[in-house]
Image (cartoon, grey):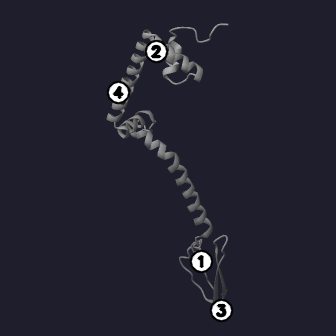
Amino acid sequence: MSDPFSKSCDDVRLNLYLDGELGENESEWMNAHLKDCTVCRKKAATTVAFTRAFRRRVQDAADSIDFVALEKEVIKKTLPRYVPPNAFMGFWEAMKYIIPATLLAGFLLFYIYTHYIDNPAPVPSAIIESFSGSVSSVMIFETPGTRETIFWFTEKMDTDMESEHDAL
């Protein structure tokens, strides 16, 4: 029966070993192999040195970055902002609210005016320019619905004189 770890100089297994992802038996085998193989020891040393240098440079770069300013700049460039194409378009956008509100206010004012504001006093439909004759009593009626003025008078009868009355 052959040993599963008998392969020598396996780069994938070396990287898994350096990352700490091998099982206990494979890790023991890799320790023994690194003691005997100078090629794998050099590869391991190079990989470890490269990884440390890479992490150090990433950390140095991360320390020198102002993340608050970076975040503001990213938000500024990535979030959409509404800017009207021109002032005229902004005016029309406002009109879609102003016009209906104005119409509603106008209808309300018209309704209130026609239903709740007192109607003006009725005005006579004819003006009497002159009246001549003898009358004993005069009554004036004004009709509310049709705004008509009615004069009702009683003539005095003079036997000697014919009564005259003119209403113009």
Query: Which residue corresponds to the image point at 39% horizontal and 16% vertical from the top-left?
Result: 46
Mark 3 — residue?
A: 158
Question: Disc 3 on helix, strand or loop?
Answer: loop
Q: Nearer the viewer, mark 2 or mark 1?
A: 2
Q: Are marks 2 and 1 in contact (CB under 8 Å)?
A: no
Q: Position of residue 121 (x, y in %)?
A: 58, 75
Question: Disc 2 on helix, strand or loop?
Answer: helix
Q: Position of residue 64 (x, y in %)?
A: 32, 34
Mark 2 — residue?
A: 35
Is residue 23 something that shows in the picture? Answer: no
Mark 4 neighbour density, 10 Å: few (under 14) some (14–19) many (20 or more): few
Q: Nearer the viewer, mark 3 or mark 1?
A: 1
Note whether 83 is above or below 160 in the view shown. Answer: above
Whichever of callouts 4 and 1 sits on the residue coming sooner in the sequence is: 4
Whichever of callouts 3 and 4 sits on the residue coming sooner in the sequence is: 4
Label 2 is placed on what type of residue? Lys
Q: Nearer the viewer, residue 143 or 129?
A: 143
Label 3 is placed on what type of residue? Asp
Query: Which residue corresponds to the image point at 64% horizontal and 73% vertical from the top-left?
Result: 148
Whichever of callouts 3 and 1 sits on the residue coming sooner in the sequence is: 3
Q: CA distance from mark 2 to mark 4?
A: 31 Å
Q: CA distance from mark 3 to mark 4?
A: 133 Å
Q: Nearer the viewer, residue 70 or 42?
A: 42
Dot label at residue 167: 1
Q: CA distance from mark 2 to mark 1?
A: 142 Å
Q: Are marks 2 and 4 in contact (CB under 8 Å)?
A: no
Label 4 is placed on what type of residue? Arg
Mark 4 — residue?
A: 57
Query: Which residue corresponds to the image point at 52% horizontal and 14% vertical from the top-left?
Result: 12
